[in-house]
């Protein structure tokens, strides 16, 4: 009788151990599977949306990082205007249209435009970036668009910097506005686009329509493959789930 009880107890322990092992393995595998699927989903989603935008002038890395930050801010409820994602690629020539407005609802590129960089950031190409007051340089990173106002440059849009690299945007009066030096005719006369004090200045044509679309809490990302920014940006390096 004692042997039977001992045998039954041993079988119970063995069966329970195997069951527990199976449950642990399944749970762990599901976690790994879910994690991998979330990463694959973002990769698939970003590639699919990039294909829909159908403009290879937009650097994929600039788009991918901008999309990741947009999704992170959206998931946290940090964006009031979720319809638009604006990306400015400061790695390309100022003589090229390097501002992209993506309609996230229609998943289409809605607007492209010339945009100026800070005069101390470089000539035709922006190479130096700063968050310091009176640096007259462009600041990289994610911004949230804010309110409009009428200032010395007319109708303008305030920007709030969301990162270590641009959190002085308000103090520096970095805003979106129209400027004569940001127009195609300026390039024809001078060989390159003019430069600002750090503001992403736009051509007069359509600038009011652009501001009215992206104002009041949309995501704007100013990109450059600068390692000092990319390595330290929490939004660029955030994990992404869809």
Image (spheres, rainbow, N blue to C red):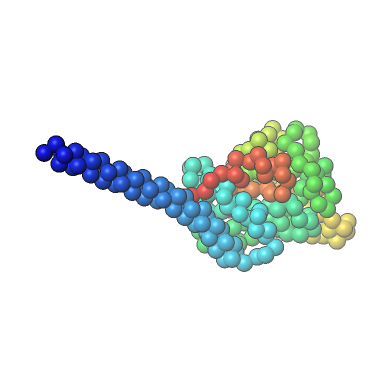
87 is higher (above) or lower (below) than 198:
below
Check the picture and name the quadrant holding the N terminus.
top left
x, y percent for residue 176: 68, 46
**Residue that lies at the very extreme toward the left in this rendered image:** 1
Q: Kindly tell me whether residue 151 is visible in this rendering.
A: no
Which residue does the image show at 68% across and 48% down from the upper left? 222
Q: Is residue 226 left or right of residue 3?
A: right
**Across the whole image, how many numbered discs are drawn on residues?**
0
x, y percent for residue 154: 70, 45
x, y percent for residue 193: 81, 54
Depth order, front residue of 73/22:
22
Which residue does the image show at 84% across and 50% down from the upper left? 123
Q: Is residue 59 left or right of residue 193?
A: left
Which residue does the image show at 69% across and 42% down from the upper left? 229
Q: Kindly tell me whether residue 89 is visible in this rendering.
A: yes
Which residue does the image show at 52% across and 48% down from the upper left? 240
User: In the picture, residue 196 is in which quadrant?
Assistant: top right
User: In the picture, residue 162 is in which quadrant?
Assistant: top right
x, y percent for residue 198: 75, 42
């Amino acid at each position: 009788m004692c042997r039977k009880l001992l045998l039954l107890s041993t079988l119970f322990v063995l069966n329970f151990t195997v069951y527990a092992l199976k449950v642990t393995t399944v749970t762990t595998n599901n976690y790994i599977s879910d994690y991998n699927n979330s990463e694959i989903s973002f990769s698939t989603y970003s590639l699919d949306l990039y294909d829909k935008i159908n403009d290879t002038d937009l650097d994929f890395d600039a788009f991918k990082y901008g999309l990741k930050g947009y999704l992170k801010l959206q998931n946290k409820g940090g964006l009031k205007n979720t319809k638009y994602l604006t990306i400015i690629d400061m790695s390309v020539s100022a003589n090229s249209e390097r501002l992209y407005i993506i309609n996230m609802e229609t998943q289409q590129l809605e607007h492209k435009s010339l945009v100026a960089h800070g005069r101390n950031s470089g000539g035709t190409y922006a190479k130096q970036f700063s968050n310091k007051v009176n640096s007259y340089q462009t600041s990289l990173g994610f911004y949230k668009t804010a309110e409009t106002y009428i200032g010395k440059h007319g109708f303008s849009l305030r920007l709030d910097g969301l990162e270590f690299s641009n959190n002085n945007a308000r103090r520096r009066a970095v805003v979106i506005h129209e400027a004569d030096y940001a127009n195609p005719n300026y390039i024809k006369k001078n060989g390159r686009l003019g430069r600002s004090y750090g503001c992403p200045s736009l051509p007069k044509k359509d600038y009011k329509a652009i501001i009215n679309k992206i104002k009041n809490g949309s995501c704007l990302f100013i990109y450059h493959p600068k390692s000092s920014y990319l390595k330290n940006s929490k939004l660029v390096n955030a994990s992404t789930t869809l």
